[in-house]
Image (tube, rainbow, N blue to C red):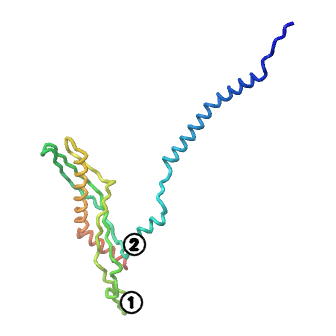
Amino acid sequence: PTLKSSPAPAALPHHQTTLARASMLPWGLFLLALAAAVFLGWKLWQPEDIGDPLTTSLVAFEKQDKLTVFSAELAPVVPSDDSRLFGLVNSKQVAVIPARVDYTINLAAIGRERLSWNAQTQTLGVKLPPLTVSRPNLDEARAQYLRDGIWISREAQDKLTRDNTKLAESQAIAQAGNPVLMNLARQSAKEAIS
């Protein structure tokens, strides 16, 4: 009788261990890629560190004795022109830039000399200080532009936009002094103080 030798018992488990390790490799790479994607996503969308918000706010505090009694939103329409290359390249831009103007009175200016008491009618008379018109707050995020020209370079567009902004501010200041708006603001101031 011939004896057949059986396979060594250690060879089979070693083959299974190698196979198990080989099948774990794709899962390990997948988990590593997932962890890297989560980390990069967290870094990309994490909130910005703006420091201590209380400290940041305290820098901006300022005492105000002004009362805003009226606000108007204006929409100046302003054109600007630009010429380049010795007048060969011309461009034009018309802008509509919304602007907000506030009308305020300085409450610190109301002292005893501006107050009068009428004992018979039991009324207090107040002589209001003059209205102050704020500098226009231009909302360039809502601005609308119409451009005309064969070719408008980046420098020309920047110049046109700067010119439009300056013109819009000066036009808004002029419109804010309109007698109709001033009368509405005075009436609003009287109602607010009463």
| Residue topped by disc 2 | 62
Going from N to C along the chain, the mark reached first, 2 or 1, is 2
Residue 193 at x, y = what percent? 37, 78
Quadrant where the N terminus is found in the figure = top right
Kindly identify the amino acid type of the residue bearing the numbered disc 1. Gln
Q: Is residue 70 left or right of residue 18?
A: left
| Mark linked to residue 161 | none
Going 39% across and 74% down the picture, which residue do you hit? 63
Q: Is residue 177 left or right of residue 59?
A: left
Going 16% across and 48% down the picture, which residue do you hit? 83
Residue 102 at x, y = what percent? 32, 68
- Alpha carbon separation for disc pair 2 and 1: 37 Å
Q: Is 89 above or below relative to 140?
A: above
Going 50% across and 50% down the picture, which residue do you hit? 46
Q: Is 175 above or below relative to 88?
A: below
Kindly identify the amino acid type of the residue bearing the numbered disc 2. Glu
Label 2 packing within 10 angstroms: few (<14), some (14-19), many (20+): few
Residue 23 at x, y = what percent? 65, 28
Quarter occupied by residue 152: top left
| Residue topped by disc 1 | 122
Going 47% across and 66% down the picture, which residue do you hit? 55
Which label lies toward us, 2 or 1? Answer: 2
Q: Residue furthest right?
A: 1
Q: Residue furthest top?
A: 1
